[in-house]
Image (tube, rainbow, N blue to C red):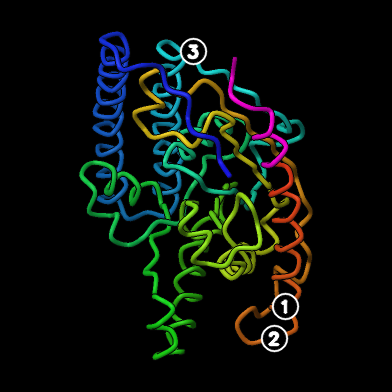
Amino acid sequence: MARPLRRSPASPVRLLVGSVTFLIFAANTIFWVALLYVATLLKIVVPLAAWRRLLSRVLTVIAEAWIAGNSLGLALTQPTRWDVAGLEGLRRDASYLVLSNHQSWVDIPVLQKVFLGKIPFLRFFLKKELIRVPLLGAAWWALDFPFMKRHSREELERHPEKRAEDLETTRKACEKFRHAPVSVINFVEGTRFTEEKRARSGSPFRHLLPPKAGGLAFAASALGTTLRSLVDVTIAYPDGRPTFWDLISRGLPRVVVRVRELPIPGEWLTGDYQGDEAFRARVQERMRLVWEEKDALVDRLVAEGPAA
């Protein structure tokens, strides 16, 4: 069970620091998103493939500058101690399929900070509805983030053919990444961990929800031989799962991240997860073993206890 987050008492200092950090984030976002919109317009109005590939690289540079600005804001205002290991050997000129456990919205800025400059710009699978988020929705679209229409289990049971639609959507989203190195991340639990969700899902793990291997297998098949490896990320918050306010207001004493590079089985690049039952079972078994190791690792990291 996760430890309760150790928070400093509510105080004018914490409110001031949180407000200043939020303003840094807001100003940084408005500045870089404005530039990103200009580059996006230039990409749209000139329908030449080479030009659009060039503008895609420009958009990525802008996005990485945006992340760097946010990370600098945190470094200047927060005393968070970052304990990160396992980045050795990762490359900017290779494509990766990244998987991670998911505990908090804080996971996303954590992953962006940790991998900035280490691997290609991270792209996430996003729910289609998120394209309507002010400022960010259009920015994600311009950066070629894959938007997915997710069907509920009940809907899939009523309409099994929609599984094929999900696969085709994944393939189309990933096809555009074949022309340049990319890092595609998948939160294979499908949602953020809570004890309630753990109980409801019947998870056999102490700190994780059961992995949903289908999306990972679909992405591996869509990206194919362009992939170098699987990057397995484990995030732990020994002082408890934080909120965004904790992140920006000195409420996050320590972040622990462990990274390891794993080979991608060759059959993942060509297998039919939907139609081949034996292949599907092998993928699920592989993910079960990875998740057992990850759960044990989170257990050790959390057992270290809150920061002194």
Indicate the secondary structure of the residue bearing disc 3: loop
> What residue range appears in magenta?
298-308
Q: What residue is shown at x 24% (from left), y 32% (from top)?
A: 34
Answer above or below: position of 253 versus 285.
Answer: above
Q: Position of residue 230 (x, y in %)?
A: 70, 52
> Amino acid type of disc 2?
Glu
Answer above or below: position of 73 versus 117.
Answer: above
Q: What residue is shown at x 64% (from left), y 78% (from top)?
A: 273
Residues tagged 2 and 3 counted as in contact (Cβ below 8 A): no
Q: Which residue is mark 1?
A: 281
Indicate the secondary structure of the residue bearing disc 1: helix
Badge 2, how many Cα within 10 Å: few under 14, some, many 20+?
Answer: few
- Front residue of this view, candidates 220 and 53: 220
Q: Position of residue 74 (x, y in %)?
A: 43, 19
Instruction: Point out which mark residue 222 bears.
Output: none
Q: Is residue 287 left or right of residue 61?
A: right
Q: What residue is shown at x 30% (from left), y 54% (from top)?
A: 130
Q: CA distance from mark 1 to mark 2?
A: 6 Å
Which picture quadrant has residue 151? bottom left
Residues tagged 1 and 2 counted as in contact (Cβ below 8 A): yes
Q: Which residue is mark 2?
A: 277
Q: Which residue is mark 3?
A: 79
